[in-house]
Amino acid sequence: VPLRRASVLVTETPLTPGFIKEEAESVLLGTLKCKEVCVISGPPLALYSPVIAKQLDLSNPCCLVLSLGFSSCLAVPCIEKRALDHAIRRLNVGGRVLTNLLLEHLKARHYDLSKSWLVAEDMLMQTSEISADFTYDIATNFERVKEKVFVLPDFEDNLRGYVETQKANAPLPPSLSTPIKSELDPETPAALQAAAAPAAPASSASGASSSTQIRGSSSSNDTGNGRVAEATTTPTPAGIAGKKGNGARKTAKENQPDEDLNRVRLRAECVAIPEALFSPADHGISHQGGLTDLVIEAIQAVDKEEAVRLPFCQIVLCGALAKLPGLRERLSRELRQELPSHWPLRIIQEPEPENSVWRGAAALARDPAFRTNTFRTKRAWDEESMAAASGANSLGKRPRRNAG
């Protein structure tokens, strides 16, 4: 769609200075010449997401949006889906801080990924989890935390790293841990190579085939130079032999065991690094509390009469960090201990919380009333700019005439 006919909705972080919003509108309307533009705070839009809107209690217009983003975490109290700016609280710990903590650990013990921090961020999101009781995990030397093995991408076959599904402490199967002893000798006659090609045995009942190299006898397989093919039977996954075809030779890359891949083993780091969300002081951020304190401070910042009459007991989670396993349960347990007992605490989250704001913005942009009252058109911006320019000129001094 050409920009001259495009309606653009831009989200901003709460508490952003007003002049930044004006500059954004100036670029979109003046430079890019969009048809109409709306710059609005992002976290409250998650309340308009269809999945979240169905879970909200309509009898209670109060809720609190907890946005767990890249640069920070924000607690935004809302009444009737409108943010209370004076009660917004911010925690300067987000995905970037957690990634930096992981980079420092990897640099000291594994690899220096400071120039590829996106790989470290992906590793963080795939391996991290929130501990149910971090104090207990420290006392037991993280016994109940499972070790995870993250395979770094080689950007040839694997463009993205992944967590091995195989148990870290279990030995590798023979097909992965033991390379084939020898390939078929290129000087061996073609008849022997054809006979030594892998084939699936007909009597196999388990679905696994075997690639077998034939050990020839001195009477039948002598080649004149005294070389014979060695015999090994190495189990391989079913179907590989059929895909290779008769007489196909394995390359050196296919014979390379998976142990040669770059692996990073993580255990205590899986829970110690994301613990910075609940205990920033453990990582040197001593001037702020964790997520639980953030929510409590935001609720207490609301007018006491409003907070008592309309309890903020609905907590909506959005942002990529909300996907961390165990975060919702840990936050619910700690908030239950702090909030009044008669508040029916509910923590609401959709399966893809990183898209909650986008889905809410898309649903809200379809509302004609919202577009009429909130969007700023190119024509209105031009008229306001011309009026502001004429007002500035009328207040300026008249130019002096030359004496001659």
Image: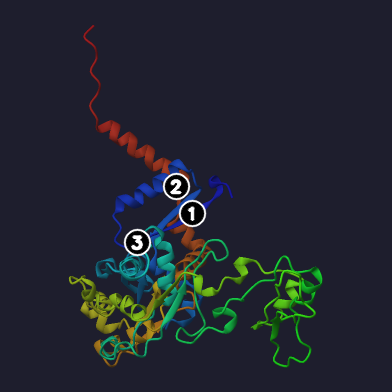
Q: How crowded is mark 3: few (under 14 residues within 10 Å), some or many (20 or more)?
A: few
Q: Name the residue under label 3.
A: 13
Q: Residues within 10 Å of mark 2 (few under 14, many from 20)?
A: many
Q: Name the residue under label 1.
A: 8
Counting residues from the start of the chain, the first of labels 3 and 2 encountered is: 3
Report whether 91 appears left or right of 314: left
- Spatial distance from mark 1 to mark 3, Cα to Cα? 17 Å
**Where does residue 258 sit, x and y in percent of width and height?**
54, 74
Q: Mark 2 points at which residue?
A: 28
Asked if one can make out residue 401 in the rendered structure from this viewpoint, the answer is yes
Residue nearest the observer in this picture, 338 or 286:
286
The quadrant of the image that shows the C terminus is top left
Residue at image position (64%, 73%) is: 182
Q: What residue type is labelled 2?
A: Leu
Q: What residue type is labelled 1?
A: Val
Asked if disc 2 and disc 1 are in contact, CB closer than 8 Å, the reply is: yes
Asked if one can make out residue 302 in the rendered structure from this viewpoint, the answer is no
Report whether 156 appears left or right of 87: right
- Spatial distance from mark 3 to mark 2, Cα to Cα? 18 Å
